[in-house]
Amino acid sequence: MSELPEGLGWLALARGTLDRVGERRRDDAWVAEAWADPCSRVLVVEQGRALVRPNPALVLLSPGQAPEGERYLLGVDPGGVAYFGVSSPLPAIEGTEAADLRAMGAVLSDRDAGLLTQAVALQNWHDTHTHCPRCGARTTIASAGHTRICTADGSEHFPRTDPAVIMLVHDDERILLARSARWPAGRVSILAGFVEAGESLEQAVVREVREEVGVTVRDCRYLGSQPWPLPRSLMLGFFARADEGQELRVDGEEIKSARWYTRPELLAAAESGEILLPGTISIARQLIESWYGGGLPGDW
């Protein structure tokens, strides 16, 4: 029996370094003072994208340089510098290009990865929650971008996050990889699914695996989590053990095919291009490589 990891280390989108200063969000005077400070930095986001320099590094502007748009207080760094996000069309700046989290999340610095992840998550929520779910009236931004207030009934609404479990199913010597019905041949990953109402995370792991591939699992062990604001998920990573001898029965709707891989088989398939593993930005890749015990070639 191979020794299994106790947790996950590096996760691309879980590397933020700022203090989110939640206690300051309703302090309008402090927020206004921070916005007026020319040392504050502003990240402009448009439909999930931001400007990036070749380094790579995010393009951060002073408040005076920033375009008009909804503002989100993102946090304060150890030096006391405040950071904001602004939802607006991206400005034209020579030597930069527009990029999204999928392309840049794994290669940006810890600070920049955290900034972009948070700003994209907030923008996605604000763009899709312009009206009150209780009465249908318009809402306005509040709490420095972290809530919205209904203009009719005064109700306060908070950003939505959908919990999703993502699980590496193993029998110690093999792991189970599957291909979604929506993916091209060769692209594979581990299983995942959203947590249902009134369901624990462990119950969701067992249910999703049984529904998608007909396998019963036990010993569901949490290893780590990563925000996935595409548009609003929190991915909660698990290992789950399956007893040998179970027949794979894919559902044919969510999952097109699935098979077991030993470590040598996994390496050979990845090296030959027979399979394409998830990219390094994903928690799926980190779970796979944690089980494997090292890096693997190729990705989507």
Image (cartoon, rainbow, N blue to C red):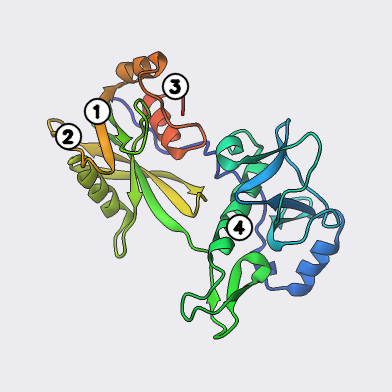
Q: Which sits earlier in the primary sequence, circle 4 or circle 1? A: 4
In the displayed structure, does residue 263 sit left or right of residue 114? left
Q: Which mark, residue 123?
A: 4
Disc 1 versus disc 2: distance between alpha carbons?
Answer: 8 Å
Q: Which sits earlier in the primary sequence, circle 1 or circle 2? A: 2
Q: Position of residue 92 (x, y in %)?
A: 78, 44
Query: Is disc 1 in contact with disc 2, using a CB cutoff of under 8 Å?
Result: yes
> In front: mark 4 or mark 1?
4
Other residues around mark 3 within 10 Å, as few (<14) / some (14–19) / many (≥20): some
Query: Is disc 4 in contact with disc 3, using a CB cutoff of under 8 Å?
Result: no
Find disc 3 in the rendering and name its residue.
296
Q: Amino acid at mark 2?
A: Leu
Q: Which mark, residue 227?
A: none
Dividing the picture into quarters, in which one does residue 74 lie? bottom right
- Tell me what residue is drawn at x 49 percent, y 63 percent: 160
* Above or below, comparing residue 190 to residue 145 in the picture: above
Front residue (pair 198, 277):
277
Q: Amino acid at mark 1?
A: Arg
Front residue (pair 65, 16):
65
Q: Which sits earlier in the primary sequence, circle 2 or circle 3? A: 2
In the displayed structure, does residue 216 sit left or right of residue 158? left
Other residues around mark 2 within 10 Å, as few (<14) / some (14–19) / many (≥20): some
Dividing the picture into quarters, in which one does residue 241 lie? top left
Q: Amino acid at mark 3?
A: Leu
Disc 2 versus disc 3: distance between alpha carbons?
Answer: 25 Å
Find disc 2 in the rendering and name its residue.
248
Q: Position of residue 120 (x, y in %)?
A: 60, 52
Disc 4 versus disc 3: distance between alpha carbons?
Answer: 34 Å
- Asked which secondary structure carries label 3, the reply is loop
